[in-house]
Image (spheres, rainbow, N blue to C red):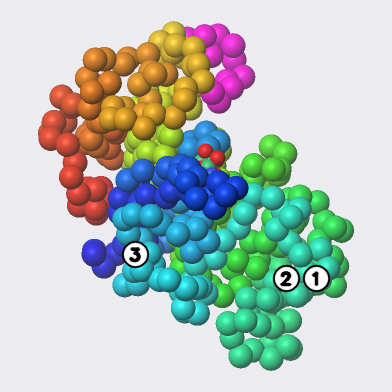
Amino acid sequence: MSENVLLDIRDLDVTYHSRSLLGFGGRSFSAVKGASLSIRPGETLGLVGESGSGKSSIANTVLGLVPASGGSIRFGDVELTSMKTRYPAEVRGQIQAVFQDPYSSLNPSMTVEDIVTEPLRVHTSMTRAQRRERAIELLRLVSLSQEHLTRHPHQFSGGQRQRIAIASALALEPKLIVLDEPVSALDVSTQNQIINLLYERRDELGIAYLLIAHDLALVHHISDRIAVMYLGHIVEEGPSDRIYKAPAHPYTAALLEAVPLLDPDAQRKRRAARKMAPVPETPRLSVAGCPYRNRCPHAMARCEAETPPAYPIAGGGTANCFLHAGDASSEPELDKTTEHVAS
Ligand SMILES: Nc1ncnc2c1ncn2[C@@H]1O[C@H](COP(=O)(O)OP(=O)(O)O)[C@@H](O)[C@H]1O
Ligand SMILES: [Mg+2]
């Protein structure tokens, strides 16, 4: 593995099994199929896609909360998917998480001081006084203050609770924070404040983020690169600006289309330019072919028969779409790592 890759996810499969009431038979459901992603130290990867596309399944697998059913996840030199039990303490401290719901993710009976210092209590031998000092520092990092230490989560707004969760995630100076829709439950102005806060702390502290969102527009400023998921597949990946300004996969274009523009004229023009077809609900497809073909306005016969590989896109990254089969160097990208390092 390249030295400057922090998290390297290769061909990850996540499958959920549900047992029947009688204890045999049951169903299995494939939530992530052959996903590959990598994050360098200090880098932010935005992982976007609509609800149910498999984003949280990837996040939870990285965090060791859900087992991988195939593929590998390397964190530095450690192969995470081979671990049968909990991650070793060094790894657990280096990968932290912030979840979507700031109301259920914080223990209501704990004070802010307890919440923010819990990782320090578990992973360090700091004294209570040292932990309190660090807690004050951490609260300052998220624009809260010392008076908040003795309060309980219910005394805070949603945005403030997310600040508390972020302070706790920062406590051990992790190398990676997995943020699973950290602002989806917040109102728009609070969303921007939290995104800005994450941006500032990242640059100061050199932390890498796996930042999950369903709204591409919200995370594109803070993300260095963006990966787009659809029905368990990564369908496009590349530099954030290129993805935002020139989406190559029709699904990415549709995701951007879903972002309302304030000017209705601009909205109409954009829709015409992208020739978007209405998007019917699609059942999950288990056979070969492009996962997006039933919703795609550009679908061709080939999209039924073959699963598109990752084609390189001018401006960086790849898209799994036959529309780009003739682009750039025209050979499908086999090893994405080489491309990331070069870009
Ligand atoms: N524990 C589980 N058991 C069975 N199916 C699940 C489980 N968790 C998620 N799924 C299914 O896997 C798919 C992907 O879910 P998820 O990873 O949560 O997507 P996202 O975070 O993009 O909304 C969904 O269809 C969801 O219903
Ligand atoms: Mg989710």
Q: Secondary structure at mark 1?
A: loop
Residue 198: x percent and y percent?
57, 55
Q: Which residue is mark 2?
A: 115
What's the amino acid at mark 2? Ile
What's the amino acid at mark 1? Met
* Magenta-tinted stretch: 258-269
**Which residue is at the front of the view, 44 or 92?**
92
Q: Does 18 sit left or right of 156 as displayed?
A: left
Q: Secondary structure at mark 2?
A: helix
Quarter of the image that includes the N terminus: bottom left
**Which residue is at the front of the view, 325 or 18?**
18
Of pointers 3 and 1, the one earlier in the residue sequence = 3
Q: Does 245 sit left or right of 64 as displayed?
A: left
Residue 104: x percent and y percent?
74, 55
Residue 135: x percent and y percent?
70, 75
User: What is the spatial separation of the Cα atoms under label 3 and label 1, in whole angstroms?
Assistant: 34 Å
Up the image or down, 303 lies above or below 211; here it is: above
Q: Which residue is mark 3?
A: 74
Q: Quadrant of residue 107?
A: bottom right
Disc 1: CA contacts within 10 A as few (<14), some (14-19) or many (>=20): some
Q: Which residue is mark 1?
A: 110
Q: Residue at x 31, y 30 (%)?
A: 287
